[in-house]
């Protein structure tokens, strides 16, 4: 076992034990009506470092706890549904507007995009950890843009999202990133760590997002998952190809001071 695979095994064991319980929420979002999901996960310290005006989840130390366990949730994004394609909507427009094509987004902050979510207490608590951006109403915005027009209930959408975050953070890929925070790694080493965790050739399902000077600061990873095999994630056969990101050949993995 490579040295970087050894950290967080205790945490990984706990999260892996919960995977069976997560099957049902994942199955609830398996939809053959579109091709794939993109699971967008933020590397929270890098995101915060990249912002000239950091939002509340970057300024408040109590909202950084989720980052200690690995990635945090940005969103779960369905690919272009056929009913939108039939109306002449292309992939780029769907990516930019999502469900706001049908119901215009209200002007103002994310908090105006959708009413407060009505979630069970246990899911509220899990989502608070998995998605620090809730402090800026990111949850309400993500659901309004990516879930509301596809008949996903709020509970189903976020139960599945939390389950997917837990599966990634239970992996050797997340362990590699956590181990190297505060340093710099080769971009290909990140892709290699992903393939070591999820299977040979699966690096094509990973898109790395970087910002800052020379696109060297890791801010997010995006993972393609087949819509009809969501419950099988992270099995290699469940992964769907993504376009390559624009990270430099060497990538900085920021850490909170």
Image (cartoon, rainbow, N blue to C red):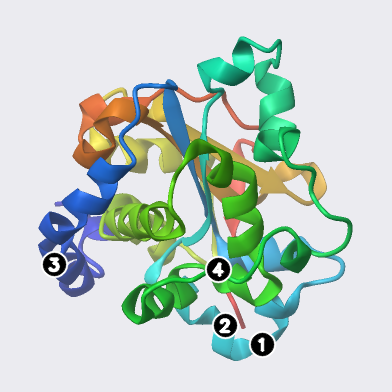
Report crowding for label 4: few under 14, some 14 to 19, many 20 or more residues within 10 A (C-alpha): some
The residue that mark 1 highlights is 60
From the viewer's perspective, tell me whether residue 211 is left or right of residue 122. right
Tell which circle, 3 or 1, labels the residue nearer the N-terminal end.
Answer: 3
Q: In whole angstroms, how far apart are the C-alphas of marks 2 and 4?
A: 19 Å
- Can you give x and y, in whole percent of width and height, for residue 230 in the image? 29, 37
Mark 2–mark 4 contact, CB under 8 Å? Answer: no
- Can you give x and y, in whole percent of width and height, for residue 237 in the image? 22, 25
Secondary structure category for the residue under label 3? helix
Q: Is residue 28 above or below residue 171?
A: above
- Can you give x and y, in whole percent of width and height, for residue 38 in the image? 48, 36
Could you say which is closer to the camera, residue 22 or residue 239? 22
Report crowding for label 1: few under 14, some 14 to 19, many 20 or more residues within 10 A (C-alpha): few
Report crowding for label 3: few under 14, some 14 to 19, many 20 or more residues within 10 A (C-alpha): few
The residue that mark 2 highlights is 63
Which label belongs to residue 22? none
Residue at x-position 31% and y-position 60%: 166
Residue at x-position 86% and y-position 70%: 53
The residue that mark 4 highlights is 182
The residue that mark 3 highlights is 13
Q: In whole angstroms, how far apart are the C-alphas of marks 3 and 4?
A: 25 Å
Query: Visible in this render: residue 175?
Result: yes
Tell which circle, 2 or 3, labels the residue nearer the N-terminal end.
Answer: 3
């Amino acid at each position: 076992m490579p040295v970087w695979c050894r950290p967080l095994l205790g945490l990984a064991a706990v999260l892996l034990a919960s995977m069976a319980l997560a099957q049902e929420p994942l199955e609830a979002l398996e939809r053959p009506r579109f091709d794939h999901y993109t699971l967008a996960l933020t590397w929270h310290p890098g995101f915060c470092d990249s912002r000239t005006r950091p939002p509340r989840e970057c300024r408040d130390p109590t909202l950084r706890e989720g980052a200690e366990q690995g990635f945090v949730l940005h969103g779960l994004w369905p690919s272009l549904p056929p009913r939108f394609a039939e109306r002449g909507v292309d992939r780029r427009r769907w990516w930019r507007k999502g469900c706001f094509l049908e119901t215009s987004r209200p002007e103002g902050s994310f908090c105006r995009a959708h009413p407060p979510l009505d979630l069970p207490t246990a899911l509220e608590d899990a989502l608070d950890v998995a998605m620090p951006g809730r402090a800026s109403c990111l949850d309400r915005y993500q659901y309004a843009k990516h879930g509301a027009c596809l008949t996903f209930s709020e509970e189903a959408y976020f139960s599945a999202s939390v389950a997917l975050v837990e599966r990634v953070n239970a992996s050797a890929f997340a362990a590699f990133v956590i181990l190297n925070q505060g340093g710099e790694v080769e971009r290909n080493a990140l892709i290699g760590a992903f393939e070591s965790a999820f299977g040979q050739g699966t690096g094509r399902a990973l898109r790395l997002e970087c910002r800052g000077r020379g696109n060297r600061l890791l801010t997010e990873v995006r993972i393609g998952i087949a819509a009809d095999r969501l419950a099988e994630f992270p099995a290699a056969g469940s992964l769907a190809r993504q376009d390559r990101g624009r990270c430099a050949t060497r990538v900085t993995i920021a850490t909170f001071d």
